[in-house]
């Protein structure tokens, strides 16, 4: 994402390490999306106190499932921490949403251990 400097200002953090990686894109493949309501019309929020609410988790997971049917290539889901990611993935698994994702896409989960992820 560019310009990278803006994200440290927006998030009010000082990066310890940052890198720029040049990429050549043959077609427009980055599509930012802002979602305020799920398919059930319940509000969707990333607020800390609402982020593990089952309805919010289900709506984000359902959105991911819907995107796997529309987007021809890969998807990237960003989580604010590994602990949060593990919690959400576990909940998606219990809800059966990961099975739906796996019908359309290969799932690669990054871990804090570079050897394990690689």
Image (tube, rainbow, N blue to C red):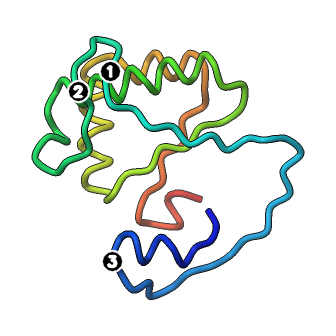
Mark 3 is surrounded, within 10 Å at the Cα level, by few (under 14), some (14 to 19) or many (20 or more) other residues, namely: few
Mark 2 is surrounded, within 10 Å at the Cα level, by few (under 14), some (14 to 19) or many (20 or more) other residues, namely: few
In this view, the residue in front, 107 or 12, is 12
Q: Are marks 1 and 3 in contact (CB under 8 Å)?
A: no
Which label's residue is closer to the chain start, 1 or 2? Answer: 1
- Alpha carbon of mark 1 to alpha carbon of mark 3: how far? 29 Å
Q: Are marks 1 and 2 in contact (CB under 8 Å)?
A: yes
Which quarter of the rendering shows the C terminus? bottom right
Question: In the rendered picture of this protein, how many numbered marks are placed on residues?
Answer: 3
Q: Which residue is mark 2?
A: 43
- Alpha carbon of mark 1 to alpha carbon of mark 2: how far? 6 Å
Quick check: 58 above or below 12?
A: above
Q: Secondary structure at mark 3?
A: loop
Q: Is residue 112 left or right of residue 41?
A: right
- Alpha carbon of mark 3 to alpha carbon of mark 2: how far? 26 Å
Name which residue lies at 63% across and 18% down: 70
Q: Secondary structure at mark 1?
A: loop
Q: Which residue is mark 3?
A: 12
Residue found at the far left of this picture: 49
Q: Position of residue 96 (x, y in %)?
A: 33, 16
Quick check: 109 above or below 102?
A: below
Query: What label does residue 38 carry, if any?
Result: 1
Which quarter of the rendering shows the N terminus? bottom right
């Amino acid at each position: 994402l560019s310009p990278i400097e803006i994200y440290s200002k927006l998030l009010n953090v000082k990066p310890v390490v940052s890198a720029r990686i040049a990429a050549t894109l043959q077609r427009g493949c980055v599509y930012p999306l802002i979602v305020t309501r799920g398919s059930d019309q319940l509000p969707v929020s990333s607020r800390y106190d609402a982020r593990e609410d089952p309805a919010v988790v289900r709506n984000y997971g359902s959105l991911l499932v819907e995107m796997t049917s529309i987007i021809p290539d890969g998807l990237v889901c960003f989580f604010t921490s590994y602990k949060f990611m593990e919690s959400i993935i576990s909940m998606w698994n219990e809800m059966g949403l990961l099975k739906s994702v796996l019908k359309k896409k290969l799932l690669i989960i990054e871990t804090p251990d570079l050897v394990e992820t690689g």
